[in-house]
Amino acid sequence: MIRIGLNDTEKQAEIEWYAKWNGITRIFIFYPETFPLAVKTDLPIEYTTYKDIIEYKPFYHLLEVIDESSLLVFNECLRTQNRSDLTYNCAHHYCNQTPHKIVFEWLPFIDDENDFMILLDFINKGKYKGKSFRDYFLKEENIMAKPHQFTIRTIDIPITDLDRKRYEEKKEALFAGLGKRDPDTIPRNLHIFAGSLKKPFIDPDKDYVARNARFNLPNVTTYKTVEQKKYIIIDFPHRRIDFNDFFKQTRMHDIVSLNSTLKVDLYYINEFRAWIERLGEFYAKTSLYK
């Protein structure tokens, strides 16, 4: 079964219930180091980090000990949009040895609903292999979601004509020097430039998050070091999964972002709004967790 949006207490309850009513004799939990899941149970339990799923020693050990009475729990293991990723493929070998699998994710996808197929592959790889997402798949399996809805509000900051001129010069220089490099480097660098214009507007009494530690201020952190509290966004992360991890770690839903009104800031803001819309559409098709 797949459960979306649950906290650790709710995950614990789901595991307890499933183990009790399905004759489970042993539990195996897979998790990324950033998102561990400690489960209290009288059953034998074994933990494997996401990065160790592909390692030789744990791989063959797990193939030996997982049987039809084992419960596999995948906790926040949606780490890449590459459905053919080696880690996923190794995990599927474990999944083939038992019908008992629970998949927990805070959000149903990284960027769009096709990512959800990765979660369905954990449940039944053979059934969904090579298939794109279809709404009716949500009714074919035991899937429930506790929706997490997001909003975004911007704080527009004034910038000078000189700032806009420097921005255009920066953009022209990036295009001129692109060559065969990834074109995504252009918005990445322009967003960093726009973020640096926001430093004079950082309130020392509030907490902020930025792509890197260039501000050297005690109240500005990076996405890798956030805690469970509210932050104001200076720069958006370039990778969507980094933003999703930010939501898991902070439990934020109402996002506030400093906005230079330069086109690159508007691009990231609009991309996030489009993601919010896709998320809402997905939840509307999913059975709600009660």
Image (spheres, helix red, strand yellow):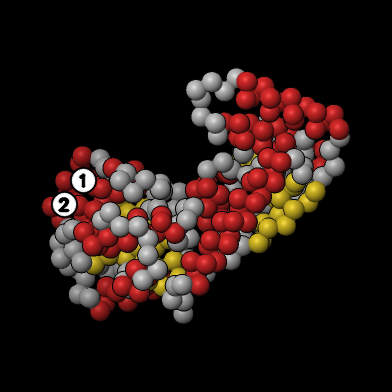
Q: Quadrant of the N terminus?
A: bottom left
**Whether residue 228 can be seen here:** no
- Residue at image point 86% right, 32% down: 161
Please tell me the numbered disc located at residue 224. none
The answer to whether residue 148 is left or right of residue 1 is right
Q: Residues within 10 Å of mark 2 (few under 14, many from 20)?
A: some
Q: Position of residue 154 (x, y in %)?
A: 74, 53
Which residue lies under the disc numbered 2?
63
- Residue at image point 82% right, 45% down: 157
Q: Nearer the viewer, residue 288 or 261?
A: 261
The answer to whether residue 141 is left or right of residue 61 is right
- Residue at image point 62% right, 39% down: 211
Please tell me the numbered disc located at residue 59. 1
Q: Position of residue 155 (x, y in %)?
A: 78, 51
Gap between marks 2 and 1, in whole Å? Answer: 6 Å
Q: Residues within 10 Å of mark 1 (few under 14, many from 20)?
A: some
State the residue lying farthest toward the left.
64
- Residue at image point 50% right, 22% down: 180
Q: Secondary structure at mark 2?
A: helix
The answer to whether residue 123 is left or right of residue 273 is left
Q: Position of residue 9 (x, y in %)?
A: 45, 69
The three-letter amino acid code for the residue at tag 2 is Leu
Q: Nearer the viewer, residue 264 or 30?
A: 264
Q: Position of residue 234 (x, y in %)?
A: 70, 43
**Whether residue 260 can be seen here:** yes
Q: Nearer the viewer, residue 275 or 205?
A: 275
Q: Secondary structure at mark 1?
A: helix
Picture quadrant of residue 159: top right
The three-letter amino acid code for the residue at tag 1 is Phe
Q: Are marks 2 and 1 in contact (CB under 8 Å)?
A: yes
Q: In this rendering, is residue 57 above or below 19?
A: above
